[in-house]
Structure formats: structure tokens, C-alpha cells
Image (cartoon, helix red, strand yellow):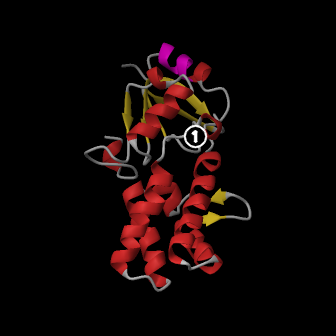
Amino acid sequence: MRPIQIKAGEVTAKACCVVYDKDGTLVDFHSVWGPRIVRSANALAAATGLGDDFVRHLYRAVGYDASTNHTSGQGPLATAPLDQLVIVAATAMFQSGITWDKALELSSTCLLPLMAAQPEAKEISPRGNLLSPLRELQQHGCRLVVATTDNRDSTDLMLGHLGIQDCFKQVICGDDAGPIKPDPEVLL
């Protein structure tokens, strides 16, 4: 495979493979995950009776700002696979007075189903025209890959909805066996 010249913003590089993150790169992260964490936090608050203070604490713990509906790019909501997000939410409940066993149970039964639910079409907002640049890279012999911490079912559904699933030679998800993002082994 022969490298091609790629320009992204002010950076120019030679590449024969481009690895895309899904959320925030191919689809609008906030339209999917902001509303989901709000629904999850409200479900946990209702199940525990902890109220608004807990909701604000959970938002801080996962890296979500409800006033802007934006997520910290380095917080658990943006970077952690769902099984780790369950632990973060359980920890926030434990810190708010819920026993650890109950916190884990509630996180698994209240948060996980809402966060892992199949995305609805209205949640999937592309970050611009995706198909043309992906096809152009393919035509120049560039291998395209997706690496995401999202689960396989949701990822496949989103890429299919956007009509770009067949553009990628490989899709690596957070619930796959083997290394997951941000492990550099994913790139190797």
C-alpha cells in the first residue's frame, strides 16, 4: 500500500491508513450521549431518592456539563466503555450514601440499559458530509478504520444509518475482545 498525502487543518501527513473515532468525529457526540446521561442520572436519582445534589455529583464524576450539554473530552462519559461507566456511576452513588452492592445493582439496571440502548435516528447526527471524503480516501487506496469505546451494536447501527459502514475495513469497539481505545495497541 502506497501512502497518500492527507491534510487535516494545518497538518499535512502521509498515510495509508486513517483511524476515525466515531463520537465527535463521525457523529455529533453531544446529541447522543448528553440526553442519555441526563435520562440515566434522573433514573438513578429516582431509584435512590438522592435528588439533585446526586445528579450534579454524577455529572461531575462522568465529565458532563448540563448547562451546556457538553462533555469533557477526557472524562469517563467521552472515553470509558460502558462497563467502566457503570463503575463510575456506582462510585458516585456509594459516595452519596448507597451501599456498594446496591450501587452496582442500580447502576447495572438503571444506567446501563439507557446508555446501551440502540440509538434512535434522531440521535444520529453526522459531523458534516462524510461519504464523499471517505470515498475519496478509499479511491486513493487508503485503508479506513473506526476505533470507538462504544459497543458493537450501537456502532454498527450508527454507521449503517449514516450509509458509511462499508467504507471501513475494520471497526474496533469497546465491547470487542482484545485491546480497546485508548490503548495504543489498537493502532498497531
Relative side of 74 to 1, left or right: right
The structure residue drawn at horizontal position 36% and vertical position 41%, both measured from the top left corner, is: 187
Q: Residue lying furthest left in this view?
A: 178
Q: Assign the N terminus to one quadrant of the image.
A: top left
> Vertically, is 121 above or below 42?
above
**Image x and y of residue 7, in percent:** 60, 31
Magenta highlight range: 134-139
Q: Is residue 168 visible?
A: yes
Q: Which residue is mark 1?
A: 25
Q: Main secondary structure of the magenta part?
A: helix
The single residue placed furthest to the bottom in the displayed view is: 97
Q: Secondary structure at mark 1?
A: loop
x and y percent of residue 123 in the render? Answer: 62, 41
Q: Is residue 63 left or right of residue 79?
A: right
Q: Is residue 63 visible?
A: no
Q: Is residue 168 above or below residue 180?
A: above
As rendered, which of 87 and 5 lies closer to the eye? 87
